[in-house]
Amino acid sequence: MDRKTVESANRGRLRVEVRTEGQSEVVTPRGELDHHTADLLRVPLDEALGQGRTRLVVDCSHLEFCDSTGLNVLLGARLRAEAAGGGVHLAGMLPVVARVFEITGAEAVFTVHDSLGAALAD
């Protein structure tokens, strides 16, 4: 299992772990996803897609906040993954993050799972 971690310059705001599990690239953001930290998630998603990994699973169970910039990062990754024949699966969203997806209607365009295990089993 290959694993790497990137962190935000604003200590503790966002850390992103990436690992490969079977056919899925699992990306785990921890902390706050916003205008200032969005590239920390965008870069590993883009790298995974650039390497031909088209099934992306974003483990949201440690994502404490997501604003519109973070949402746009995920939407952009979804479009690129689907264009390559794959998709983006969101797993384990905390209620505060799930609410952003519900309010914007974005939950309708993603495959959403209750847990990482469920997303990997799908």
Image (tube, grey):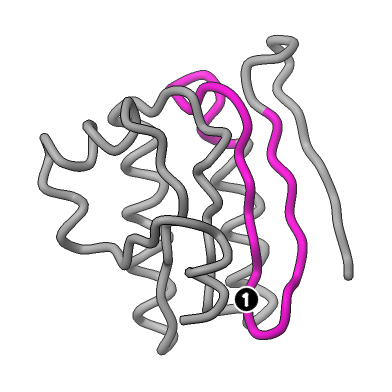
Q: Residue furthest bottom?
A: 85
Residue 35 lies within the magenta run: yes
Residue at image point 32% right, 43% down = 72
Quadrant hosting residue 16? top right
Q: Position of residue 90 (x, y in %)?
A: 42, 57
Quadrant hosting residue 79? bottom left
Magenta residues, start to end? 15-39
Quadrant hosting residue 22? bottom right
Q: Position of residue 88 (x, y in %)?
A: 42, 67
Residue 30 lies within the magenta run: yes
Number of numbered tags placed on the structure image? 1
Residue at image point 58% right, 42% down = 41
Q: Nearer the viewer, residue 115 or 24?
A: 115
Please tell me whether mark 1 sits on a helix, a strand or a loop: strand
Above or below residue 83? Residue 75 is above
Dot 1 amino acid type: Ser
Residue to which mark 1 is pinned:
24
Above or below residue 97? Residue 47 is below
Above or below residue 30? Residue 74 is below
Q: Position of residue 68 (x, y in %)?
A: 28, 30
Quadrant of the drawing holding the N terminus: bottom right
In the image, taking residue 105 as reference, residue 50 lies left or right, namely: right
Residue at image point 22% right, 32% down = 99
Callout 1 environment at 10 Å: few (<14), some (14 to 19), or many (20+)?
some
Q: Position of residue 35 (x, y in %)?
A: 43, 22
Residue at image point 77% right, 62% down = 19
Above or below residue 54? Residue 41 is above
Q: Nearer the viewer, residue 109 or 95?
A: 95
